[in-house]
Amino acid sequence: MVRDKKYVSIIMDLALLFFITLVVVTVIFIGLGVNDFFSDLVNLLITLILVVITFFTGIVPGMVFTLVFVFGQLAFVSYQYVFFEKFSYGSLFWLIVPPLYCLSIFLITYQVRLLEKENQQLRQDSAQLNTLDAETHLRTLSLYEGDFLMLTDLSERFKADLYTVVIRVRYWDSLKKLMTDEQTKELLKLVTSVFQESMNNSNALYLVDQHVPTWSSLVFSDNEALRVLRELLKERFLEELEKSAKLNNLTIDLLVAQAKYDPNEMETGTDLLSDGVNSLQYDV
C-alpha cells in the first residue's frame, strides 16, 4: 500500500509539473505574437472552458468537446489555406495544446480522487478496528475476534455450545435513504438499548459492522433459548419503536439470527460471524 501511495503521489506531481509547463509555454507563445492576439485570446478562453469541463465531468466528456474544438480549428485552418492561401505554423499550437491541458488536469484530479478514496477507506477500516464504537459504545470486530478465541477454549473445555446472535435492520439500505442523520443515530441507539436489555449482563455485545449496522453477541446457550430470545428482541424493539417520537412514523423491523460454533469448520470469529450473517436471510 505504501508503494502504491508513493506511485500515486509521483504521478500527481508529474501531472502538476506538466500542467505548469503547459501554462508557461502558452504564456510565452502568446507573448511572441506568432498569431493574432485576439485569436489567441479566444482560443485560450475556449481551452480554459474545456479544462473546466474535464475537471468536473471527467476525461471522456472533456476529450469529446476538445476533439470538437480541434476539428473546428482544423476546418478553419484548412479554409484559410484553401481560399486565402494563408497558413501559419503557429495555428498548429491550438490543435495540440488543448488536449494536453485536458489530459494533464484529468491526471491531477484522478490522482486526487484516488487519494481521497484511500483516505476514506482508511477511516472506515480505522472505525472498524477501534475497540469501542463512537455512537453505541459497544465493542467492535477486533474485540469480537479476541473474545471468540477465549470463549471457544471454554466451550471445548466444558463441552458447552457456543452461539453467536446477529442483528440487522431489515432493508437497511433503502431505509437509510428515508431517514435523517438524527433518525439514524436514534435508531442505532434504540437497537443497542433493546439488545442490551434483552441479553444477560455477562454477555458482551458488539457492533461488528458500522457501514451496514450489525450487532452481535457470543453466548453459551441452546437453540430453544435463543429462539425465545429472538422473539423477545423483536417484541421489545417494536414496543420501544412506538414510544420513539422520531421513529414511530417509519416501518422498521429487525432481522435476528443465530449460528452455532463448529470447531471442525470455524477457525476464526469471522467464520462464525459470517455464518450468522448468512442465516439472517432465513429470518422472514
Image (cartoon, helix red, strand yellow):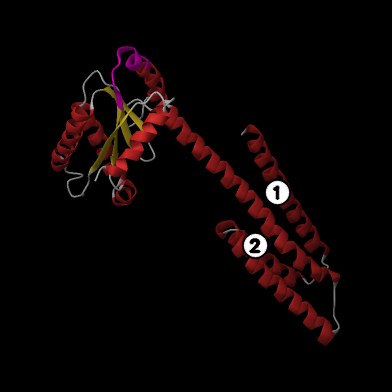
Q: Earlier in the sequence, mark 2 or mark 1?
A: 1
The x and y percentages for residue 269 are 40, 26
What residue appears at the point 30 percent right and 40 percent down from the top-left corner? 280
What residue appears at the point 65 percent right and 64 percent down from the top-left corner? 63
Q: Which residue is mark 2?
A: 48
Q: Hey, which residue is sitting farthest front in the picture?
A: 264
| Residue 33 in the image: above or below residue 221 | below
Q: Which residues are magenta?
A: 153-163
Which picture quadrant has residue 112?
top right
Dividing the image into 4 quarters, which one contains the N terminus? top right
Numbered disc 1: secondary structure: helix
The disc placed on residue 15 is: 1
Say left or right for 171 vs 149: left
What residue appears at the point 80 percent right and 58 percent down from the top-left corner? 28
What residue appears at the point 21 percent right and 25 percent down from the top-left corner? 199
Which picture quadrant has residue 211?
top left
Q: How many marks?
A: 2
Which picture quadrant has residue 47?
bottom right
Q: Nearer the viewer, residue 154 or 204?
A: 154
Q: Hey, which residue is sitting farthest top in the picture?
A: 157
Q: Nearer the viewer, residue 261 or 140?
A: 261
Q: CA distance from mark 2 to mark 1?
A: 17 Å
Say left or right for 101 vs 165: right
What's the amino acid at mark 2? Leu
The x and y percentages for residue 129 are 44, 28
